[in-house]
Image (tube, grey):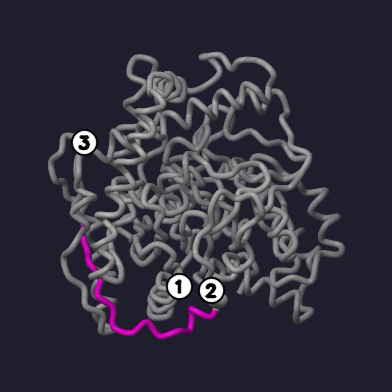
Amino acid sequence: MRVSDLDATACAELVRSGEATPRELVDLAIARIEKHNADLGAVIVPLYDQARADAENPPQGPFRGVPILIKDICATVGGALHTNGLAPFKQAGVRFPHDSHLVAQLKKAGFIVVGKTVTSELGILPAAEPPAWPPARNPYDLTRSTGGSSGGSAAAVAAGLVPIAHANDGGGSIRIPASCCGLFGLKPSRGRVSFAPNLGDVNGGLVNEHVVSRSVRDSAAVLDVLAGMVNGDPYTAPTQLRPYTAELTTPTGRLRIGVETKHVGLDGSIVDSHPDCVAAVRHATELLESFGHQVEPAFPAAFRDPEWTPRFLSIWATGVTMDLDESSAVLGRPIAQHEVEPLTWALAELGRLISGPAYAAAWRWIQRNTRESAKFWDAFDLLLTPTLAEPPCPLGTFRSTTDDPLAAIFRAAEYTPFTPPINATGQPACSLPLFRNAAGLPIGVQFVAAYGREDLLLRVAAQLEAAQPFEHKATRH
C-alpha cells in the first residue's frame, strides 16, 4: 500500500517503527502536492522550507513526522500568509507572528505543517471558490465542488496529498466537504476546542475547530490532542471522562436512532432530499439495523420552525459585518466594495441594519428553540439525516452577482438544510462516507448527538467503519 493511501495514524506508525523518517513523509507529501495541486487548487500557501526544517527533529508526539495542512481561516501559522479568503489580505501579504493554540497543539503532537488550504471568502459559502484564489476542485470529478468552506483541506485529504487536514465548521464547513469528498468529518461540541489566543469564539459560538480525516481513529486521536480549555476562554464543553480513542472499541449497546430525509424549504414547505441522499440514508439505516439498533422516523419538531433561517441569517450577517470591519482594521484602511464578493458586501450591509436588540433576540430565540429541540435527545440517542440535500454540485453554483447578491446564500440554504441548526444548538455531529451514487460521487450521512456526546458519535462511526471500511478511490498517485 502506498503512503498516500494511509491515514495519519498509519503514517505515524511508519515513523515509530523506523520504516520511514519524518523528512521522507514530508518530502512525499510535498511531491504529491506539486504533482496534483494544479488540478485540485487545494493548497494555496506552500510552507515547504519550514516543513523540511521542522521534520529534522519533530516532537515525540503521537503523530511525529506526519504532514498536515492548515485551513486559511481562524487558525494562524506564525509567519505564514493568512488571508481568510480575502483578496486584500493576499495582496497586502498579511501575516500573524504566532501560531494559534490549535496549530501549536498539532505541532506539539508531532505534526509537520506543509502548507495552507483554500477556503471561501470569510468562510461564508459551502464551497471553496474565493476570487482571491483558484477554486478547489473535487478529486472525484474536477468539474464539481469540494463543498466548503473547508474545501481545500477536504480535496487534499481525499486526493492523498496529506493524510489529514485542519478544518472548521460554522454552518457545516467540516461536514459538507467531508460529504462531498468521501471523508469522515466530525464537528465537535461548542467550546470543545479553543480559539486561543486570537479569538474567544466566532459568531457567538457557531464555529468549531477540528479536522477532516480518512478514518474515525484519526479524528478521535486529534480530538484528544485539541480538546480542552485554555485560560481566557469564554466557556468550554464538558470534560471528556477518558480519551476519545478509547471510545472506538467501546460497545454502543442497542441505540434508538431517529431518521429523517425531509427538510423545510425556503417557502416553508416540506421538501424531500435528492434520491441519492435518501438512498445514502437508507443504506446507513440498513447497516444500523443489522447491528440491532432501533431506527425509526423521527425528527426534532423545533427544527421545523420557519424562523430558523431568518434568525440564523441575522447572526451570520452580523458576523460578516464584524469580520469585514476587523479585516479593515488589520489592513489599516477600509475594504472597498469592489474588493470582495457581492454576497460578502451585501451580508455586511445587512448586518449593519441589524440592531443590538435584534441580534440579542435572535440568539434568545435560538437558545429557547435549542432547549425545545434538546428534548428529542432525551428519547433518542442519535439523529440520522443526509449531510446534504443534494450530491456534490457543479463549480460556480454559489457564485454571487451584483444584481442579486443574496441569491447565493439562499441557494446555499437549499443545499445545506441539515447542518446549520447543529451549529446553532452547539451539538456535536459528524458526516460518514458510506455511499456513492451512480456517477461515483460520495454522498455522506450525518449523525447528531446530544451536547457533549462526541463519545457516542465516535462509537457508532467506528462500528460503521468496521462493517464497511471507508474507501478513498480519489487518491491520486
**Residue at the front extreme, as displayed:** 357
The image position of residue 469, as x and y in percent, is 44, 75
CA gap between label 3 and label 1 equals 34 Å
Residue drawn where x is 25% and y is 62% of the image: 375
Q: Is residue 291 above or below residue 465?
A: below
| In front: label 3 or label 2 | 2
**Is residue 284 highlighted in magenta?**
no
Q: Amino acid at mark 3?
A: Leu
The image position of residue 405, as x and y in percent, is 37, 21
Q: Is residue 151 left or right of residue 380?
A: right
Q: Is residue 348 above or below residue 422?
A: above
Where's the N terminus, which quadrant? bottom right
Mark seen at residue 455: 1
CA gap between label 3 and label 2 equals 38 Å
Q: Earlier in the sequence, mark 3 or mark 1?
A: 3
Q: Earlier in the sequence, mark 3 or mark 2?
A: 2
Q: Which residue is mark 2?
A: 244
| In front: label 3 or label 1 | 1
The part of the chain drawn in magenta is 246-260
Q: Which residue is mark 3?
A: 266
Q: Earlier in the sequence, mark 1 or mark 2?
A: 2
Q: Is residue 106 visible?
A: yes
Q: Is residue 118 above or below residue 293?
A: above
The image position of residue 266, as x and y in percent, is 21, 36
Q: Amino acid at mark 1?
A: Asp
